[in-house]
Image (cartoon, rainbow, N blue to C red):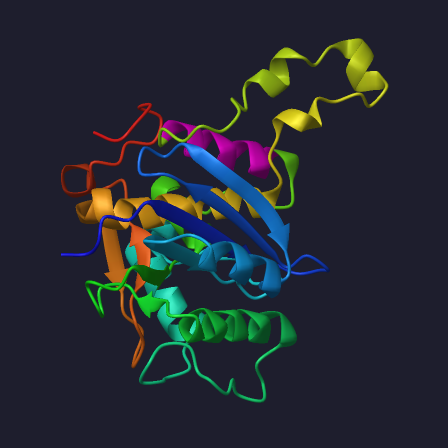
Amino acid sequence: MPPAFSFFIGVDAAHGRRPFTYICLDPSRKLLAVGSGTAVDVLSFAFGQPTTLLAFSPPHRPGQALSGQSGGHAPALGDFLLQKEWNWPTESGFPRNPPPECPSWLRASFLLIDQLQELGFRVFASEEDAPRQWLETQAEAAFSALLERPPLGAATLEGRLQRQLVLADLGLDVPDAMEFFEEITRYRLLRGILPMEKVLPTAELNAWMATQIAWMAIHQPEALQPVTPRGRHAVYLPQSLSQPAQSGVRVNSGSFS
């Protein structure tokens, strides 16, 4: 049996000067912390939390949409991850020496996981009594699996609103995206005065999803499907909504069953 984790952390890896964004929830999914920064910032925060399960979401290749076969269902997305995205075999998870063709934005993700493991984080379920564990997910693939189709573009306003609605329907305490529309008037729209404070940044949306996956791994493991790339630890994704009896996940129903 895994330890009774007191903290669930989701980390999204992106690009830019502050490449990592994290969300921390307690077992009741109450928001405890949100932050962004460098690998050092993430490591400092994560190491300060005992009995922690951390879910890490590496970035997908820039310009490479997770469109997927079969309408973007989770199994097809799992195949995508397996065949195109992270197909670098290794015996113990992320490679300690990324291959030469590994781009810098992905190399940073490999190095962060290396450092987490040096701080005592163990791959989820590999050492069941380890107080600090981590698992891998992929936020974009998770949104696609839950929607049963590729979501709208992550860089667009409508894509962010769509993802925020998915998170709210999962029972997470994110702002109600529909309030964005309640404050739009002709006057405000003509002058470009939009209530953007009600729309979360893409990186935060991804970190929320990663944290949800970590929480599900303990509280609703039947709602996840582990995809195991060749020679790698599992990548955890939500079950497709086409399997509601198995997963219990119901987007647009307001919560998990």
Spot occupied by residue 153 in the image (x, y as percentages of width and height): 58, 45
Exactly how many numbered labels are in the figure? 0
Which residue sits at x=19%, y=63%? 128
Question: Looking at the picture, does residue 157 appear above or below residue 43?
Answer: above
Q: Nearer the viewer, residue 179 or 52?
A: 52
Determine which quarter of the picture holds residue 246. top left
- By secondary structure, the bulk of the magenta-drawn segment is best described as helix
The answer to whether 86 appears left or right of 177 in the picture is: left
35 or 189: which is nearer to us? 35
Query: Looking at the rendering, which quadrant does residue 41 occupy?
Result: bottom right
Front position in the image: 46 or 210: 46
Q: Position of residue 69 (x, y in %)?
A: 37, 58
Residue 196 highlighted magenta (yes or no) = no
Asked whether, in this view, residue 24 is left or right of residue 148, the answer is right
Residue 1's spot in the image, x, y percent?
A: 13, 56
**In which quadrant of the rendered image does the C terminus lie?**
top left
Span of residues in magenta = 158-169
Q: Who's the residue at 70% across and 14% down the image?
A: 184
Q: Is residue 162 magenta?
A: yes
Instruction: Work out whether 16 lies above or below 245.
Output: below
User: Does residue 152 appear in this view?
Assistant: no
| Residue 187 visible in the snapshot | yes
Residue 20 place in picture, x, y as percent = 59, 57
Residue found at x 31% / y 58%: 236
